[in-house]
Image (cartoon, rainbow, N blue to C red):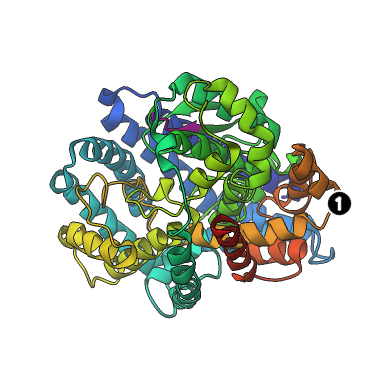
């Protein structure tokens, strides 16, 4: 056995997981409704095969053989890192019973289809039994993984290594203290939000958002944009990275910013070092997911950076509003660039997380995290979620939720079994400001932002974040790129500056 044998065995696992990603993408974009039951079984079969391969004797022998071959090389050697990282992750995966892995994969596909129907029909009662099954499976997975404190930690750490519910609560408290007065101030700013609700043909939205995504650096030669109920990005190696959007004719920012958000995810995956394709560093063994991003939080930092730090900036619209007006001349003929910039940055508490403004977005994450933690701890019941959701939205945002479609049924995550992933959105918001502040210290990046040339920023992110894939931890990448670990200071500074501009 040799390191080359190890690479071959890991590549086989990754290949299967990329096939799972393809089936998942199809199930959420193009698959006819009749395919749901069989697709769930197909995905469960492939996920089971990937687990069996990863935890089987052949991979274990390959790990031992690679260790023997690399015995004298430094621990910093990238080959040695790959072997040890795979060994630790696979050991965690092995603690999760095989039948549970397969059942969760099957349930995920069926639950996603049921969720989409329930969301359209405002039918939480019809979806609840599948959600109960999902939460029970996630409790079992959390028990199998194990944790030192709160059971939610086991699930959160699969998406954000090292993160705990205790640490998150402290982080949320700091943000809450900063956001409440900022939100109050921003709501006093003058804004013409009605201009975003005019009739904007979807075809033109698609063209404009795609054009800007290309300028940011998303390569359509290795990607594509499709429609879905809930926007997402998924990769089948760096050579095939797909994004989706959801366009509404009477809500312009919903389509534009969702595409730029997903393009940010796509740019990350396309920027992973080519030599990491089909390797340990593009394989999440615990979640059995082919992905190059080192964590969900780091991934979200890239999507939120392009969506908010770049595309909601005043300079961005100074540069590109003319193009948008050319695409929608009658809709925007009476709108100035200042009007539009204020409109897309206005603080407007709303029901839908993916369309929330920057100052209210993290409140959406906090309430979801609290619900997840209580569900996994067995402190609340699935049947009570609509009422709990309404109470929390009223408490955090002062809104009365009119339906479950605009409330507890709006997100795809729970139907996907992604319990513990919501906190990574706030972690990503925080990281995005840290990365952006560090990048702007580069004169070429700053000049590019001022000129509308986004290649220098993309290149900086490629070099400092993307190329590493999963070969470094989130903290290692963050510290290496910015000089500091996770801290909300830069994020709060960005939001404070924007509120000052909006209220000036």
Q: Is 304 situated left or right of 399 in this image? A: right
Residue 453: x and y in percent read 77, 37
* Residue 247 forms part of the magenta stretch: yes
72 displayed left or right of 212: right
x and y percentages locating residue 478 in the rendered image: 69, 63
Provide the residue designation for mark 1: 443
Q: Is residue 442 visible?
A: yes
Give the main secondary structure, helix, strand or loop, of the magenta stretch.
Answer: loop
Instruction: Write down the quadrant of residue 100 in the picture.
Output: bottom left
Give the x, y percent position of residue 403. Answer: 19, 47
Magenta residues, as a range?
244-248
Position of 328 with respect to 28 (left or right) is right
Q: Is 125 on the left-hand or right-hand side of 481?
A: left
Residue at the image position 82 percent from the left and 45 percent from the top: 447
Specify whether residue 233 is in view. no
- Callout 1 environment at 10 Å: few (<14), some (14 to 19), or many (20+)? few
């Amino acid at each position: 056995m040799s390191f080359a044998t190890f690479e071959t065995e890991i590549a086989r696992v990754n290949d299967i997981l990329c096939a799972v990603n393809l089936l998942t993408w199809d199930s959420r974009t193009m698959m006819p409704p009749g395919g749901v039951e069989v697709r769930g079984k197909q995905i469960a079969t492939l996920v089971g095969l990937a687990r069996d391969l990863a935890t089987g004797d052949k991979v274990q022998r390959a790990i031992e053989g690679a260790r023997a071959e690399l015995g004298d090389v430094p621990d910093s050697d990238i080959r040695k890192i790959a072997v040890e990282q795979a060994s630790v992750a696979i050991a965690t995966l092995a603690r999760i019973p095989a039948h549970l892995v397969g059942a969760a994969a099957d349930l995920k596909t069926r639950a996603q289809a049921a969720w989409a129907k329930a969301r359209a029909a405002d039918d939480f009662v019809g979806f609840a039994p599948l959600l109960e099954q999902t939460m029970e499976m996630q409790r079992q997975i959390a028990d199998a993984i194990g944790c030192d404190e709160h059971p939610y930690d086991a699930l959160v750490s699969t998406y954000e290594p090292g993160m705990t519910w205790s640490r998150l609560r402290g982080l949320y408290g700091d943000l809450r203290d900063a956001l409440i007065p900022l939100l109050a101030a921003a709501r006093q700013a003058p804004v013409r939000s009605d201009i975003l609700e005019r009739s904007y043909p979807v075809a033109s939205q698609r063209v404009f958002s795609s054009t800007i995504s290309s300028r940011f650096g998303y390569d359509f030669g290795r990607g594509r944009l499709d429609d879905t109920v809930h926007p997402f990005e998924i990769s089948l190696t760096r050579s095939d990275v797909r994004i989706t959007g959801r366009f509404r004719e009477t809500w312009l920012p919903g389509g534009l910013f969702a595409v730029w958000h997903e393009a940010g995810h796509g740019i990350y995956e396309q920027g992973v070092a080519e030599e990491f394709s089909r390797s340990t560093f593009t394989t999440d063994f615990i979640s059995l997911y082919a992905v190059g991003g080192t964590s969900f939080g780091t991934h979200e930092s890239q999507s939120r950076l392009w969506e908010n730090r770049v595309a909601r900036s005043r300079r961005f619209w100074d540069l590109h509003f003319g193009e948008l007006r050319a695409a929608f001349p009658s809709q925007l003929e009476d709108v100035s660039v200042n009007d539009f910039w204020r409109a897309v940055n206005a603080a407007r508490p709303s029901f839908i997380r993916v369309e929330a403004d920057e100052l209210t977005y993290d409140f959406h994450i906090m309430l979801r995290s609290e619900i997840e933690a209580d569900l996994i701890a067995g402190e609340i019941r699935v049947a009570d979620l609509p009422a709990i959701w309404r109470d929390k939205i009223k408490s955090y945002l002062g809104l009365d939720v009119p339906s479950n479609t605009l409330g507890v049924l709006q997100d795809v995550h729970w139907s996907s079994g992604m319990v513990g992933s919501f906190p990574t959105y706030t972690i990503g918001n925080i990281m995005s400001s840290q990365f952006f502040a560090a990048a702007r210290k580069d004169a070429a990046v700053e000049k590019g932002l001022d000129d509308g040339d986004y290649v220098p920023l993309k290149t900086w992110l490629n070099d400092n974040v993307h190329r590493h894939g999963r070969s470094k931890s989130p903290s290692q990448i963050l510290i290496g790129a910015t000089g500091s670990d996770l801290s909300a200071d830069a994020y709060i500074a960005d939001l404070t500056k924007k509120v000052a501009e909006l209220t000036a």
